[in-house]
């Protein structure tokens, strides 16, 4: 079992839908991350939150909107996604910058 | 963004054999890390080696680092079926992890 919990595990949505991915950690970590991983590729960083504030946005399209309601929770709001956004979305947390602890991800499919 | 290359891309070995994979990176680093990803799962941190270290061991894992060549290697000794996974090296720069392309290891029973 991982210490970073992501829900849902799988999500299928249409291009006009609005959905959210959720991530939770109770390790007291102060940094939380969103990554996107395509099949047979390494994870690519999307966003970094440090002390509940967005510190890094890797030029991610605005159809992805992160939110950090408190130090344990991280959301990724999705709207008007494209088929190429289908991927595994991974959440991670860390006390400092490293090492990072990953959840098992949400596998997202866009119809 | 992807930091560098890993080779081989894929590796198939018999249980009990050793597996070696290499990682090259492009920029100067504070440390280099290795992560494992089992199929359908998240990444698990394996080991971190600092830029002033040349070799580090953790159980059946041995990592080397050559900063002059900007390269690292991961050796898994006495492999087991449970070692079947993808292995990624990663460098970090102020909370940003950049991963190599990864090596897929298959351990045959």
Image (cartoon, rainbow, N blue to C red):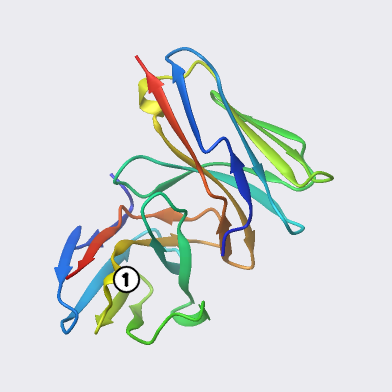
Asked if A67 appears above or below B29 in the picture, the reply is below
Q: Nearer the viewer, residue A15 or A19?
A: A15
Q: Nearer the viewer, residue A77 or A16?
A: A16
Q: Residues within 10 Å of mark 1 (few under 14, many from 20)?
A: some
Asked if A5 appears above or below B85 in the picture, the reply is below
**Residue A73 in the image, given as x and y percentages of width and height:** 32, 72
Q: Is residue B37 left or right of residue B78?
A: left
Chain letter behind tag 1: A
**Residue A33 in the image, given as x and y percentages of width and height:** 44, 68
Q: Is residue B44 left or right of residue B76?
A: left
Name which residue lies at 64% across and 68% down: B94
Asked if A95 appears above or below B55 in the picture, the reply is below
Q: Can see residue B55?
A: yes
Quadrant assignment for the C terminus of chain B: top left
Q: Quadrant of residue A35?
A: bottom left
Quadrant assignment for the N terminus of chain B: bottom right
**Residue B106 in the image, given as x and y percentages of width and height:** 41, 27
Give the labeled residue for mark 1: A85
Name which residue lies at 59% across and 43% down: B6
């Amino acid at each position: 079992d991982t210490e970073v919990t992501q829900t849902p595990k799988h999500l299928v949505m249409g291009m006009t839908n609005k959905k959210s991915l959720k991530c939770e950690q109770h390790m007291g970590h102060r940094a939380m991350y969103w990554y996107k991983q395509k099949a047979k590729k390494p994870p690519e960083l999307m966003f970094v939150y440090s002390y509940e504030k967005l510190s890094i946005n890797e030029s991610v399209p605005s159809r992805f909107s992160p939110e950090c309601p408190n130090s344990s929770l991280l959301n990724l709001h999705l709207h008007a996604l494209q088929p190429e956004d289908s991927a595994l979305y991974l959440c991670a947390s860390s006390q400092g910058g490293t090492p990072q602890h990953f959840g098992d991800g949400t596998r997202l499919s866009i119809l | 963004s992807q930091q560098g290359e890993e080779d081989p891309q894929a590796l198939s070995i018999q249980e009990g054999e050793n597996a070696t994979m290499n990682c090259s990176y492009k920029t100067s680093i504070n440390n280099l890390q290795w992560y494992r990803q089992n199929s359908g799962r998240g990444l698990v941190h394996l080991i971190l080696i600092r830029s002033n270290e040349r070799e580090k061991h953790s159980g059946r894992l041995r990592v080397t680092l050559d900063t002059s060549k900007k390269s690292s290697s991961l050796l898994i000794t006495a492999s087991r079926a449970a070692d079947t996974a993808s292995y990624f090296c990663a460098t970090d720069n102020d909370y940003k992890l950049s991963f190599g392309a990864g090596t897929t290891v298959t351990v045959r029973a």
